[in-house]
Image (cartoon, rainbow, N blue to C red):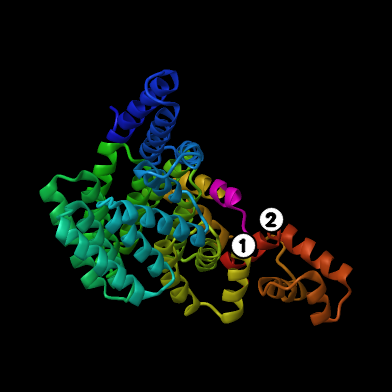
Amino acid sequence: MKGLHQEGAEIFRWSADCLRESTHGTEEERQRMLALVLACQGQCIMSFSYQDAKALAQSSISIMRQLPTTKETIHALHIWGAFVIDDSEKIRLTQEALNIAKANHYGWWIPKFTMDLAHYALDQQDYQRAELLLQEAHAICRETNEVGIIVQVLLAFARLANCRGDYVEARRLALEGQALAQDMGYTAAILWTTSAAADYALMQRDYSAAYSYYQTGLLLCQEQIDRLSAVSQLIGLCSAACGLGNYREARQHLGEALRFALAMGFEAAKLDVIGAAAWLWKHSEQVDRAVEGASYVLNHPSSYDFMKRRLTHLIADLQSVLPSEVFTAAVERGKTFDLDEIVKMLLIELSQPLSDVSHAREQTITRPLPDPPTERELEVLRLIAEGLSNYDIAVRLFLGVSTVKTHVNRIISKLCVKNRTQAVARARELRLL
């Protein structure tokens, strides 16, 4: 069964092939229409093949930049903006599109881009400017009765309430948008609003309601074969299941989310899964791993705003339960991680049955080491956990660097691990630290 996005992509691909072979109209008209079709094809593909969508958007904007500005230019700018990482460039593209829309009286696009600028203001925590822009967009929509955009404006107001910590109001606005979307039969908007309501219920720690909303959202994603949105719903289900104490189910949802993210090749989706894994590690009492994972995602340039807000709450909780030096060392370790290595490790971990993981962890905690570390080696191990280099350890303990290296190698051998980071993690499991 094909989803709406896949069917749309095939129609646009066929249209692009026809345009390339066509001789009707002028060359400029054909190129303009081709650029528009490529942008639309990319928009359809985005939900299940991110890199292909990005390539199509790049082709579209490259063609359009060579032609005089028209309404089609706006569409190409809008699609390409979804793939730009740099915030200042996103704002520049949005402002350019808004200026074109206002100059040519392209009604629907004016409140749309005004609202997008409000989102960027929210990213910069400029809540006053965001509110003014949203009020402007809402007033335009009321005049023109653009109900589809009103739903999006309500979601933006909900996000503003969330940024201010008013989760009750954020959830109310999301559900108001959901009711409008359902009246219109606007499937995509029903998904957006349901997902938003779930996110705000999660922030309120209303895990049962959040779980129910995410389930509804996942069904909508499955109907449309929308992998990108499905990743968000599965991660939400994982978080809600953790809150309800159902860790087995949480792992299953997270594993499925990771497989979707890998299939799309979408970096931000992988980061979102790692962020959710940090929550799972916290609930599994692997606190140092949770700090490392959260630190990595928070410091990654491709992490988006809502992801960071959730992890900021998490890392604040973790900081309150760990000694300051241990917490700081875990944060610093997280900053040095490699995305591909984390994903590979997480994929293996989530493919194991929970009973096997629990049993293996239980064995590492209870089974005594045949050759435990000496007092001096434990002293070195504690300094490794603080993030000190071999040279710094040598200075602290008044030892030669070669002696410290010997101690480190013995620690790694005795703990049956491959490197210093694994040694610290294993030592914590064995309650040596």
Q: Tell whether position 217 is magenta.
A: no
Residue type at mark 2 is Cys
Q: Is residue 339 magenta?
A: yes
Q: Position of residue 126 (x, y in %)?
A: 39, 75
**Would you say 89 lies left or right of 26 here?**
right
Distance from Cα at disc 1 to Cα at disc 2: 9 Å
Residue closer to the observer: 190 or 83: 83
- Of 110 and 46, the residue lying toward us: 110
Q: Residue furthest left?
A: 183
At x 31% / y 76%, what residue is drawn?
165
Instruction: Identify the residue position indicated by label 1 in the image.
Output: 426
Is residue 352 visible to the viewer in this orientation of the structure?
Answer: no
On screen, residue 217 versus residue 344, left or right, reads: left
Check disc 1: other Cα within 10 Å, few if <14, some if 14-19, many if 20+: many
| Quarter of the figure with residue 423 | bottom right
Of residues 79 and 280, the one nearer the viewer is: 79
Residue numbers of the magenta segment? 337-344
- Residue 357: horizontal and vertical position, in percent? 48, 52
Q: Which residue is mark 2?
A: 416
Instruction: Give above or below for 32 relative to 143.
Output: above
**SS majority, magenta:** helix
Contact, mark 1 vs mark 2 (Cβ under 8 Å): yes
Q: Is residue 383 above or below residue 236?
A: below
Q: Earlier in the sequence, mark 1 or mark 2?
A: 2
Up the image or down, 98 lies above or below 169; here it is above
The tag on residue 391 is none
Residue 167 locus on image (x, y percent): 26, 71
